[in-house]
Amino acid sequence: MEILPKSLSRWVKAAALVAALAPTTLYALTVDLSPEQKDRPRAERVAEAVAALPKDFKFATDGVLTVATVQGSLPLGVLATDTKTVVGNEPDIAQLVADSFGLKLELVSVAWPDWPLGLTSGKYDAVISNVTVTEARKEKFDFSTYRHDVLGFYVRADSPVKSITEPKDVAGLKVIVASGTSQENILLNWVQKNKEAGLAPTDIQYYDDESVRELAIQSGRADAYLGPNAYEAFRSAQVGKTRLVGIINGGWPLAADIAVTTRKGSGLAEAVTIAINAQIKNGNYAKVLARWGLTSEGIEISRTNPPGLPKS
């Protein structure tokens, strides 16, 4: 598997551009939590995607694409105002795929530990719930990518910090990160590299309370926060008190992707990939990401079963 400098150089340049533009393009994001989702982008049937559907594939329900998703928090998925319909970026992606196949969409809210068995048993046709592609998971499932799995560095809106994309950029800064996470491991790796290079140390800070973390950033007690980009991008877009100054892949220095998950060998993944690429080309995909403040995680092309994060 290729490492970051070779496999993601173009993507990193694009990420830097997104970081520069994000503060002016995402603030004042409005959110529709109604079960009707009248502003949800919809798509026309994609003939090529339909033709790619395996002739012997048995949908969980005829004429319906049944998709499992875990409702947790925005922007990925939460319960609507009716307290039963899941809304968010993941349901929007599911809708585009279902529309591409000319099928009705049925969303099934599941607990995270339950989706593998439910998918394998045919209880639902696909899982769209922030699932990262890994080599271990590829032994049991097929994947069609639809977002980069990325972490984001966020600073106060008026911070003098302009860009954080590589180890030297955190030298001398006070950075907040969650303990016991992949992003902590990445940050500790960066700090060690800077130490070996003779650069200034980084003051790593830990806060369990989100409000205390936010206060630390706004008061200047901390310079930046490194965390899952999806949630921070959404919060930044809504409130406008922080801004994105850099994104790195969640598998740094390896590439990681978020993907629609389907049964291994079912043949559905190829059709899903064609559907997603059609929606990328016609602009619906970009609308869905923008709707939930996730433009910075967009992909240029969907891939079937790309290299995944290695087994630990």
Image (tube, helix red, strand yellow):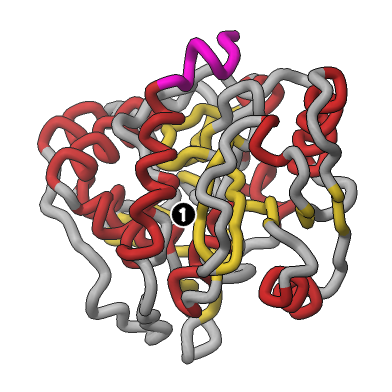
Residue 137 figure quarter: top right
Q: Is residue 44 left or right of residue 158?
A: left
- Which quarter of the rendering shows the N terminus? top right
- Which quarter of the rendering shows the C terminus? top right
Q: Where 211 sits versus 25, above or below?
A: below
Which amino acid type is marked by label 1? Val
Q: Residue at x 52, y 68 (%)?
A: 158
Please state the extent of the stretch shown in magenta in the rendering. 1-9
Q: Is residue 121 left or right of residue 276?
A: right
Label 1 crowd (10 A; few <14 / some 14-19 / many >=20): many
Q: Residue at x 26, y 70 (%)?
A: 40
Q: Is residue 117 left or right of residue 20?
A: right
Q: Residue at x 31, y 82 (%)?
A: 36
Residue 67 visible in image: yes
Residue 67 coordinates in the image, percent (x, y): 46, 54
Q: Which residue is mark 1?
A: 67
Residue 97 coordinates in the image, percent (x, y): 30, 48
Q: Where 256 sits versus 117, above or below?
A: above
Q: Is residue 132 left or right of residue 48?
A: right
Residue 211 coordinates in the image, percent (x, y): 75, 79
Q: Give 204 or 229, whichever is nearer the viewer.
A: 204
Residue 109 coordinates in the image, percent (x, y): 57, 66
Residue 77 visible in image: no
